[in-house]
Image (tube, helix red, strand yellow):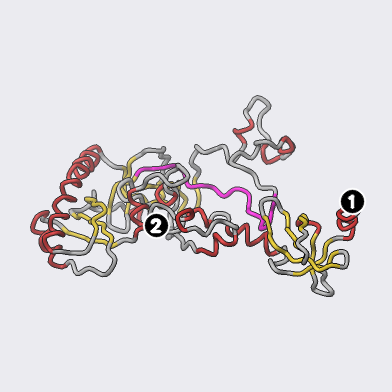
Amino acid sequence: MKQKAVHDHSDDWAYVYVIKNPSYNDICLCAWDSVLYAGTPVVYETRFGLDLGLVVGPAPVPGSHYVPGHTEVHGACLHFGDEKEEDDVRYKADDNAHQCDSCFACRITKDPEKMHVDGSVTWIDHLATPSEMARYSENEAKEEEALRICREKIRKHGLGMKLVTTHFLLGEPKVIFFFTADERVDFRDLVKDLVSVFRMRIELRQIGVRDESHLLGGLSVCGRDYCCHLMTREMDPVTIKMAKEQNLSLNSMKISGPCGRLLCCLAYEYDYYMEEKAGCPPEGTRIRIDHDLWRVNEINILSRMITLTASEGRTISVPFEEISQNSETGYWEVSEEYQEELFSS
């Protein structure tokens, strides 16, 4: 299929959209020279070749910049629960308009705006035609049968691989089989058998267990769709250190997803926890209060309180803002005003 010349643009203004592939759940940004609306089927260049994608909406426009360590964090709606926002000129609107009309977070459905794009942005090849949509539906109907045939061939060759899903490309005669395996698999004979059946290019792609969840989707322990399937474009590494820093249970059953790997959401607040803890004394630090040495036992980021324990077992909780590091001595100290308030009773 011949691609449009628009692909050669390297410096231009265009509308940029979020495009999602409904078959293997890839998400990317693509440019087009006219306004498109959510749900519009398009044909664009994927990492596997030309394929069908659906317009999710306009590319997100950056809002207010995140300030590291900022504690006055807003929810999804910038106006929710904070009347002071009415004085903010950023959210001024017509007197008869609803406040959400000027709230960036509330404007989920935004009108597309032209923006400058460079060579790193993929251009949509063309809008999908009715005949292409019909062919896509036919391909979908053939995928179940292709899975059955491939599984039979896998059993025939005795290969240690688990077939996950398959997909027929829209733009060229090519079928992709996604599979998982514990080790490298020699599937050359399998490919020969599949070529003799389908009479087209065959690609077998080995993926990990997290990629399997990304492809198939499902409900996680929180009751929502898998993050990797619903909204995560790149699956960054998640480590046990992230759970430790957030004082979460280290029971693998509680912090692992259905894929058997650590939950993606462990990474969401990790940076904020590290920023907050950078301004606090590390656990184990000893602080002199009222002629006694107290040990930092716990740092609670959510309540912004630091728990200190004395040698005889006494425990006190001190707010973050009442503890600071002396720039001259390097020691951590509790403000004298708070000490007087703490021990006066």
Q: Residue furthest front?
A: 312
Who is closer to the viewer here, 178 or 220? 220
Q: Is residue 270 magenta?
A: no
Identify the residue at horizontal 66%, vertical 51% (top origin): 302
Q: How many marks?
A: 2
Q: Residue furthest top?
A: 96
Label 2: few (<14), some or many (≥20) within 10 Å? few
Residue that mark 2 sits on:
260
Identify the residue at horizontal 50%, vertical 64% (top origin): 239
- When asked about the image quadrant of residue 38, the answer is top left
Between disc 1 and disc 2, the foreground one is 1
* Picture layout, residue 341 above or below residue 99: below
Kind of residue sitting beneath label 2 = Gly
Residues under labels 1 and 2: Cα distance?
52 Å
Position of residue 146 in the picture relative to residue 89 (left or right): left
Q: Is residue 58 magenta?
A: yes
Q: Position of residue 304 (x, y in %)?
A: 71, 53
Who is closer to the viewer here, 119 or 67? 67
Mark closer to the chain start, 1 or 2: 2
Image disc number at residue 345: 1
Position of residue 223 in the picture relative to residue 318 (left or right): left
Label 1: few (<14), some or many (≥20) within 10 Å? few
Image disc number at residue 148: none
Q: Which range is magenta? A: 54-71
Kind of residue sitting beneath label 1 = Ser
Dot 1: element: loop
Who is closer to the viewer here, 74 or 281? 281
Specify the principal SS of the magenta part: loop
Q: Residue furthest bottom?
A: 329
Cβ–Cβ under 8 Å for marks 1 and 2: no
Who is closer to the viewer here, 24 or 135? 24
Q: Position of residue 63 (x, y in %)?
A: 60, 48
